[in-house]
Image (cartoon, helix red, strand yellow):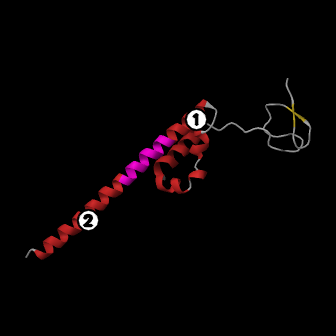
């Protein structure tokens, strides 16, 4: 079995270790979780919080999943991005429609007030 050396304490470590057992230094990235609960959480964030996520995009986990080398995690990231884009377009469209309806309603209200 192949062993590596920790860059901090110079002790032997296995390539499968995420942390050095001697000094605790992070030596490898742990794989991203692709459990159903994690996927549901990421997808929910992507759908419900489109505008807020653009403000905090660096904290949104969809980016980390999208950039992952793991194909399953990458797919979770792709779906999260698609949901984020769709929900953002839908939010903008609904805001536009709601604004137009409100303006039209106000105009109609003013017109009916002046028609005796």
Quarter the C terminus occupies: bottom left
Residue at position x 35%, y 57% in the image:
95
What secondary structure is found at the residue carrying circle 2? helix
Q: Residue 9: x and y, percent?
A: 91, 42
Residue at position x 26%, y 65% in the image:
103
Q: Mark 1 points at which residue?
A: 74
| Residue nearest the observer in this picture, 36 or 76 | 76
Q: In this view, does 103 lie to the left or right of 77?
A: left
Segment tinted magenta in the rendering: 81-92
| Residue nearest the observer in this picture, 76 or 57 | 57
Q: Mark 2 points at which residue?
A: 103
Quadrant in the picture for residue 14: top right
- Separation of disc 1 and disc 2 at Cα? 43 Å
The answer to whether 105 is drawn above or below residue 69 in the figure is below
Quadrant in the picture for residue 63: top right
Q: Residue 23: x and y, percent?
A: 88, 44
Residue at position x 45%, y 45% in the image:
85
Q: In this view, does 22 lie to the left or right of 110?
A: right
Please tell me how crowded label 2 is: few (under 14), some (14-19), or many (20+) other residues with Cα within 10 Å.
few
- Residue 60 located within the stretch drawn in magenta: no
- Residue 82 located within the stretch drawn in magenta: yes
| Residue 50 marker | none
């Amino acid at each position: 079995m192949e062993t590596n050396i920790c860059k901090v304490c110079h002790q032997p470590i296995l390539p499968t270790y995420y942390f050095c057992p001697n000094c605790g230094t992070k030596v490898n990235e742990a794989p991203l979780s692709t459990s159903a609960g994690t996927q549901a959480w990421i997808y929910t964030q992507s759908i419900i919080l489109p505008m807020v996520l653009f403000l905090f995009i660096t904290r949104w986990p969809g980016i980390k999943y999208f950039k992952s080398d793991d194909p399953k995690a990458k797919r979770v990231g792709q779906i999260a991005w698609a949901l984020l884009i769709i929900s953002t377009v839908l939010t903008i469209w609904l805001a536009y429609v709601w604004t137009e309806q409100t303006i039209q309603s106000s105009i109609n209200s003013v017109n009916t007030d002046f028609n005796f």
